[in-house]
């Protein structure tokens, strides 16, 4: 290390005692002035140790003398005396040993050994399970009662769920994106679509879908043209996403064992969601789609597939006419995949809208659309597999 690390010597024309006498003695290579020092003692003076400058008590730290500070690689990021930097060495010493060292004003309190350690927080399920179970049992009772008593009553339940789901979806679109999808033609056309699917099958559902789309286009013409394209586009999306997909549930019901088919469809979807939730909450570590739904894990998906395949094999073997267990395995696998994709699809919509739930109608669940998210895309998949495995009648 050169001398410049301690400060440059005074110029030839400067006064010898520019900084004045101090208790540190003369600088190296410079003859001190005044009677306090003599040349022989100055020549025998040992070099000062290399330590960082410490300002004098009460001195001005912005003085020009601070311009000459230690430099060189030693005072950058390299270690000092076994891995401790100069600042850390003086900071760790007590104030009595280093009276000029900075003392923290609010040191962290030492933990009290007599107090017990805080208990680790339990893993939270993320929602009110009591309310969720109660609402789920109530909905299940209504569905089963209407399904096995009078089929037409269950068609009415589907139509009501569709109308409420359309109301939630269009309301959130208007609130968050200022998109005004026409609710009146969607609600009327959606209910008619479900009834047409039950009465006339797939042909009736497609005709009702086309008429609903036309009604949305015409209804929106009664308002100013600004935003027409985005409003009708959202309306067509809502018509397909909610009522059209729900018509496949009504079409399942038309078979001789229609009630058993609908029950199998509902059981597999609910079991898939429950298996994913239970296994993912308990064992989930690897995220499935963190950018879309951070709560879903790959372990949860395996739980959904396992639960759905087991229940699917049992349902196809014992509930469905001419069904076999291996068909149930394939059915359960398909339901787990479609239910997961449907859940991720609605999560994508809600993330785009910046909301957590579509509504608050169902305590512990959110809104109707938060329960239909996995049911709607699963309905056409189950209907198609039933037709392929055991026919439509």
Image: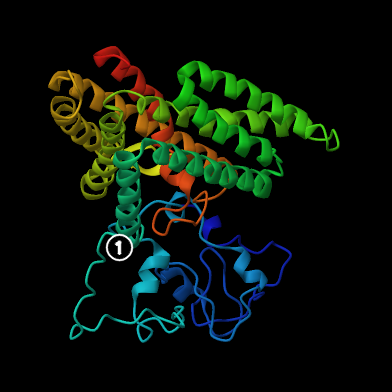
Q: Quadrant of residue 101?
A: bottom left
Residue 47 visible somewhere in the drawing: no
Instruction: Assign the C terminus to one quadrant of the image.
Output: top left
Instruction: Locate residue 137 relative to residue 186 in the image: left or right.
Output: left
Asked if 365 appears above or below 64 in the picture, the reply is above
Q: Quadrant of residue 342?
A: top left
* Number of numbered discs: 1
Residue 162 visible somewhere in the drawing: yes
Mark 1, secondary structure of its residue: helix
Its colouring scheme is rainbow
Residue 61 rendering spot, x and y as whole percentages: 61, 75
Front-most of residues 324 and 200? 200
Asked if 109 appears above or below 351 in the picture, the reply is below
Front-most of residues 181 and 121? 181
Residue 166 rendering spot, x and y as whole percentages: 57, 41
Residue 282 rendering spot, x and y as whole percentages: 21, 49
Front-most of residues 122 and 278? 278
Asked if 44 appears above or below 259 in the picture, the reply is below
Residue at position x 21%, y 76% in the image: 117
Residue at position x 52%, y 20% in the image: 204
Residue 319 rendering spot, x and y as whole percentages: 18, 29
Q: Quadrant of residue 95?
A: bottom left
Asked if 223 appears above or below 327 in the picture, the reply is below
Instruction: Locate residue 147 relative to residue 70 in the image: left or right.
Output: left
Which residue in the protein does label 1 denote? 130
Front-most of residues 242 and 179? 242
Residue at position x 41%, y 70% in the image: 44
Q: Residue furthest right?
A: 224
């Amino acid at each position: 290390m050169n001398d410049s690390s301690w400060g440059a010597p005074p110029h030839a024309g400067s006064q010898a005692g520019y900084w004045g006498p101090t208790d540190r003695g003369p600088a190296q290579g410079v003859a001190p002035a005044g009677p306090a020092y003599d040349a022989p003692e100055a020549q025998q003076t040992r070099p000062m140790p290399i330590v960082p400058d410490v300002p004098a008590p009460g001195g001005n730290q912005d003085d020009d003398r601070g311009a000459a500070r230690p430099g060189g690689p030693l005072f950058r990021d390299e270690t000092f005396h076994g891995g401790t930097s100069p600042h850390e060495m003086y900071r760790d010493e007590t104030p009595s040993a280093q009276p000029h060292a900075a003392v923290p004003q609010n040191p962290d309190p030492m933990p009290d050994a007599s107090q017990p350690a805080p208990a680790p927080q339990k893993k939270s399920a993320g929602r009110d399970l009591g309310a969720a179970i109660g609402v789920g049992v109530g909905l299940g009772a209504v569905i089963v009662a209407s399904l096995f008593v009078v089929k037409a009553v269950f068609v009415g339940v589907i139509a009501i769920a569709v109308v409420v789901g359309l109301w939630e979806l269009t309301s959130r679109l208007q609130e968050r994106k200022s998109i005004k999808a026409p609710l009146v033609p969607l609600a009327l056309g959606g209910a008619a679509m479900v009834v047409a699917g039950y009465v006339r099958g797939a042909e009736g559902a497609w005709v009702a879908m086309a008429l609903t789309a036309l009604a949305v286009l015409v209804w929106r013409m009664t308002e100013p043209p600004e935003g027409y394209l985005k409003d009708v586009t959202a309306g067509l999306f809502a018509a397909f996403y909610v009522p059209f997909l729900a018509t496949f549930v009504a079409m399942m019901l038309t078979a001789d064992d229609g009630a058993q088919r609908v029950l199998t469809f509902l059981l597999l979807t609910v079991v898939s969601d429950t298996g994913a939730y239970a296994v993912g909450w308990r064992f989930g570590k690897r995220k499935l789609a963190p950018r879309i739904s951070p709560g879903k894990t790959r372990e949860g998906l395996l739980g959904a597939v396992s639960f759905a395949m087991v229940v699917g094999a049992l349902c196809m073997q014992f509930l469905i006419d001419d069904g076999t267990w291996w068909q149930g395995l394939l059915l359960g696998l398909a339901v787990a995949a479609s239910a997961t994709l449907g859940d991720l699809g609605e999560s994508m919509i809600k993330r785009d809208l910046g909301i957590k739930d579509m509504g608050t109608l169902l305590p512990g669940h959110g809104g109707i659309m938060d329960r239909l998210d996995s049911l709607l895309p699963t309905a056409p998949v189950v209907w198609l597999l039933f037709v392929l495995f055991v026919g439509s009648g």
